[in-house]
Each structure stands twice: as structure tokens, then as C-alpha cells.
Amino acid sequence: MRKILCILSAVLMTSMVSAQSLEEQFNAFRQAAEDHYASFREAANAHYAEFLRSAWEYYEQTPAIPRPEDNPTPPVIYKDDKKKHRDEEIKADPVPQPLPEPTPQPIEPVIENDAPMDVVRVEFYGSTVEVRFPQTDRLSLTKINGDRIAEAWEQVAKGKYENLLYDCLAARDTYRLSDWTYIQLLQKITEKKYGRSNEAVLLQAYLYANSGYKMRLGASPDGQIHLLVGSNYILYDRSFYSLTEGRFFPLTEVNGGLAICQGSFEGEKPFSLLMTKEPKLEAKNEQAQTRKARTGLTATCLVNRNLIDLYNDYPTGQYGEDFGTRWAAYADAPMPELVKKDLYPALMEGVRGVPEAQAVNKLLNWVQTAFEYEYDDKVWGQDRAFFPTESLYYPYCDCEDRSILFSRIVRDLLNIDVVLLYYPGHLATAVKLNQEVNGDYLIVDGQKYIVCDPTYIGAPMGRTMPGMDNNSAKVIALKR
């Protein structure tokens, strides 16, 4: 339950007014600021500093949404009993997937300056990131109230931290960081300078907002400020705050309600969980296990351990109301170039010169028989989906991991469309071929997709695992 704070408390803000009453006030301020400031971003920071002085409202914390639990179906060994397979037409509508959005950008270009700088080096998943901090400026937030936080924001916005912001944005591009990984980098950088402190949180919020992202600042009764990041995703197992503008997730642990500044920053965009590019991290190579199928198809590859560590820290969640979007985010992540360098030539050699359907069957059998199955709750203590690379690194994987991996290599090597099929307790795939093939299939957007189950051990395409009903399967669309 929300209530507007109208009195001074030990740690909250001095002059609280409702967001509605602020609208006219800030419209007038916006016009005056735009007439006064040299740049639009300078004016935007001035607008936001004014919000920080007074636009605070109390919100209770919304409990975390747990990741969906499922009763996994164990793998089944295929036995060709010569019975006629089901060759019936089943129509299914795919779960809508979020479209990749352009990476958020500052509302205008960030320009370097020649202010005296100290170089700070931060280790980030094996890579050394260098950024510049001003020599002649240091933040101090000994008191937490609206005026003091606004003054600190204005201090950072005066121009001395432009080189730091420039370097952070350059690092995001150089290392091809996703939105979430960029958040982690900013946290590493600010805490390297200020430790885990209010100063670090304030600076991280400034860098994040001025990079184009949607955020809010909150204050807790213990005198701490917290950065809340806005997203259209539901992050599992993470508490959040439901504001008019959507869900906001705290980056640091919070117990209970917060006073949250209602002001928005110009041009803000929510962060996405999609990883559309491979992060370019320094390589820490480890030999992955050689994977050999029962048919003899064998492949070995190197995996960057630094990338595995990044994946291990990555949150899981869904877009909108359908948890099937969670698996699409994993399956659509690119296979790293280091992995493809050895893995893909070996797999391509195994399917060279054979018809498309036979190539799919060979790759399907490789995933079915070259990997050892184990339940997530036994290995990880909870459900945990893998990015494609992780199945090549870890000794065990389950049905969702196999389906994600199979969908990735088939799209990459054979350039054909694949969807995921979700049955309660089980995940499989279906592929759209360029030749006519008999077997179990579904019609998706008017196109025929043949069932391929990477956990139905030894089964060729067109065979549905016993106990699975294609009439009720949920189709999860993937990108080519």
C-alpha cells in the first residue's frame, strides 16, 4: 500500500508532494531550463535534480516471483516398434516474443574533455576495463535527504564526470555488453572508487540514467539509497517495486518499503534481458569434454570460462505473462565464436553432402546421445536453463538445455527455422524443412514443423516422446 510522505523522517525527504501536483511545476521548470542550459542533457539533469528535491513517495516492496516449478520428465529410449507414427495436422499459435530493441543511448552525444583525470582499472570477467575519474572532485553523501541527494546529482552533472561516462559507454560497445551486463559493469566501476556506499549508488544511477536507461532512486529507513532499474521483464526470485511506470528491481538487497523518487529521466528506456551479441571478453580457455554420438559423430571445442562465469551470474525471467519467453531468451543467444571455431566444422563434416532431413537427424542424434542427462534440482538445487554454450561446458544437461542447444546449432549450420515445444514437464523442438518428410508435425503460422525431441534418445525426427500431447503443446517461436 502506497502513501505519500508528508513529514520529515530521519532518512527520507524534506518536502514531499504528489506526482500530480508536480506536473505543472516541472513543465514550467522544463521550459525555463531549456532556455537557460547549454545542452539538452544538461537541462535533463537539472530537471531530474529538481525531482530529487521533492518528488518522493513511499512504496511497499512486492515479493519476488519464483521461477516456475515443473515436474521434469525423464529421458526415454526410443524403440522402433514399427507402429505407424502420428501423421496428423495440428495447428498451434506461437508464444509472442519480444523484438530486440536498439541499445539505449544518451539523449545527446557525450563529449570528452581535458579535465585532469585518474585512470581506474576494473577487472570484469577476466577483462581489464579502464575508466577515468576526475582528480579534483569527490562525492560525499553523509546525510540522506532530498536536497542533499539533489546537490550530489548536480555535482556529478557539472561536467567533471563526462570522461567517466564516455569511457563506460565505450566499454559497453567494445565488450558488446547486454543491458544487464552493463549494469553490472557500472556497479563494479563505482564500487571500485567508493566501495559499497551511497556515493557509489548515486554515481551508478547518474551513469545509468545518462546512458539512456530507466531507473529510480529509493531511500530506506536505515539511511541507504538504492538504485532501482526498470524493465518489462519479470526477473524471477527478485523482489521489486510496482510503480505507475512499471516494475523496478533494486540492485542491492532491500528489506521492506522505500521512499522512491517519482521523477523520470528524459529519454529513458527499460533494460532487456536479451543477449543479442556475444560479449567480447578476454579468453580463459578450458577444454570442454569431447562429445561423441552413438553414430560416431564427434566434436570437441574450447569454451571461455570467463563467459561461463558471466552466464552463471545472469538473471532469469520472462517477458510479459508467458514463461515460455524465458527459454527463447536463452535459445536466441549467439554461440560464441571460440566455440564455433572447432565445433561447427566438426559437425558440418559429419553432415556434409547428405539431404537436409538426414543432416537434421544426425545433429539430433548427436545431442540425444553425446550428452549425459541429469535433473537440475540434483545438480543446481533448482531449475536452471543453460545458454547453448553451457551445455558444452558442464558435464550434465536436461531436456530444456538439449532443446536450446539443438535449436541453436540447427539454425546456425542448416539455416532452417526451429521452434521450441513445451509440454508440462518437458521441452522439445520442431523444425521447418525445405523437403517433405513424414512424421509428427504441427502447423505454425501456416508452415509445417516436424517434431524433433533431443531427449527422446535415438528417436529420429517426426517421433513424439510417449506421454507428450502435441495437441496441447505450447509453441515458442525463435529467431533465425
Image (tube, helix red, strand yellow):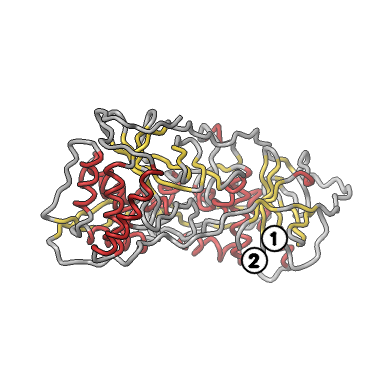
Q: Which residue is label 2 attached to?
A: 414
Q: Is residue 227 visible?
A: no
281 sits to left or right of 198: right
- Relative to the observer, which residue lies in front, 200 or 57? 57
| Point 29% across, 29% down: residue | 7
Query: Badge 1: how crowded within 10 Å, few (<14), some, or many (20+)?
Result: many
- Percent x, y for residue 432? 72, 62
Quadrant placement of the C terminus: bottom right
Q: Amino acid at mark 1?
A: Val
Q: Secondary structure at mark 1?
A: helix
Tell me how far mark 2 sits from mark 1, CA to CA: 8 Å
149 sits to left or right of 353: left
Tags 2 and 1 in contact by the CB under 8 Å rule?
A: yes
- Percent x, y for residue 189? 27, 50
- Percent x, y for residue 376? 56, 36
Q: Secondary structure at mark 2?
A: helix
- Relative to the observer, which residue lies in front, 204 or 221? 221
- Residue 480, placed above or below residue 95: below
Q: Amino acid at mark 2?
A: Leu
Q: Which residue is label 1 attached to?
A: 360
Which numbered dot is residue 436? none
| Point 47% across, 52% down: residue | 272
